[in-house]
Image: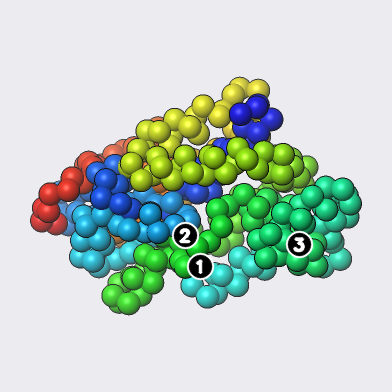
């Protein structure tokens, strides 16, 4: 893929992996333990509605069912869904066709129309929101994996905790300059075939439980001369990992916690696995054998 699209691809990796089949458990489910505390589990998700990734391994399901506490990036309740919808809209009096120009907006609206969004609706989107709608895999009419876990947790009366507020999560996009947002949107339009191929490759890497492959793809897309890609990686992953860790630790002290966050938050020097080890926890992949808490 050409250099101009590197920051777009990096963003997509973070969006998708930043919410399974039998082979997923060993690579994406991790046991977290410290003496005098009951163990907990960290699970890497992928944020899409795809039956393949929602067919969870028996080990993942067992650890989820036995947990007393469920921690997610955000809680995808009705209030959150409404908040996301509002956050994607431009301030009153601003319109996307005026920001992008007629030619670019027409290209965009044709593609969004195929996803069920009319030009009258698209004209109110922020540039980053239009990019997200355009680039994400289409829903199959159900819940994304994180949402599925959330509803299971509600039905099992688990204590629910959010590792971020909606404002904190969306500020990553809102703090991008309008020029950066338009650059990402243009790349989405110019590289749609590559984006679709990438989406499927990421799903395959996820189904194989291959954290190294997911992480390697993100690292390959960073170059010293790609300042935007570097900023995105720092704000989308590294800074959020530090914040998540601060909110995970008090829950871990209670034990029997099931933590589910995007898979790209797990690996790397500043990933949650390494940060948890730095906080004094023993962190190891959970194998397929059923072992006691």
In percent of width and height, residue 6 lies at: 62, 32
The reply to whether residue 171 is visible in this rendering is no
Rendered residue at 26%/54% (across/down): 57
Q: CA distance from mark 3 to mark 2?
A: 22 Å
Q: Is the residue 231 above or below the residue 157 in the image? A: above
Q: CA distance from mark 1 to mark 2?
A: 8 Å
Rendered residue at 59%/41% (across/down): 195
In percent of width and height, residue 185 lies at: 72, 45
Residue on which disc 1 sits: 141
Mark 3 in CB contact with mark 2 (< 8 angstroms): no
Rendered residue at 59%/24% (across/down): 223
Q: Residues within 10 Å of mark 2 (few under 14, many from 20)?
A: many
Direction from residue 1 to residue 291 in the image, left or right: left
Q: Quadrant of the C terminus?
A: bottom left
Residue on which disc 3 sits: 122
Q: Earlier in the sequence, mark 3 or mark 2?
A: 2
Label 1, secondary structure: give it.
loop
Q: Which mark is residue 49?
A: 2
């Amino acid at each position: 893929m050409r250099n101009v699209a590197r920051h777009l691809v990096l963003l997509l990796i973070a969006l998708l992996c930043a919410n399974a089949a039998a082979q997923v458990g060993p690579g994406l489910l991790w046991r977290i333990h410290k003496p005098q505390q009951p163990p907990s589990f960290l699970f890497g998700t992928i944020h899409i509605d795809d039956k393949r990734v929602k067919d969870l391994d028996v080990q993942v399901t067992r650890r989820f069912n036995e947990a007393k506490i469920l921690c997610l990036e955000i809680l995808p309740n009705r209030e959150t869904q409404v908040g996301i919808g509002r956050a994607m809209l431009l301030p009153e009096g601003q319109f996307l066709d005026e920001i992008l120009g007629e030619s670019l907006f027409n290209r965009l609206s044709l593609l969004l129309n195929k996803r069920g969004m009319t030009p009258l609706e698209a004209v109110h989107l922020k540039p980053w929101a239009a990019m997200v709608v355009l680039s994400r895999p289409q829903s199959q009419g159900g819940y994304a994996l994180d949402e599925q876990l959330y509803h299971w947790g509600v039905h099992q009366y688990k204590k629910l905790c959010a590792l971020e507020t909606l404002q904190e999560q969306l500020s990553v996009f809102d703090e991008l300059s309008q020029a950066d947002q338009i650059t990402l949107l243009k790349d989405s339009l110019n590289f749609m075939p590559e984006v679709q191929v990438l989406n499927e490759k990421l799903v395959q890497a996820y189904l194989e439980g291959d954290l190294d492959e997911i992480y390697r793809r993100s690292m390959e897309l960073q170059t010293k001369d790609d300042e935007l890609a570097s900023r995105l990686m720092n704000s989308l992953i590294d800074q959020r990992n530090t914040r998540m860790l601060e909110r995970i630790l008090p829950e871990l002290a209670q034990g029997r916690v099931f933590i589910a966050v995007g898979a790209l938050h797990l690996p790397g020097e500043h990933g949650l696995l390494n940060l948890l080890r730095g906080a004094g926890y023993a962190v190891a992949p959970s194998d397929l054998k059923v072992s006691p808490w």
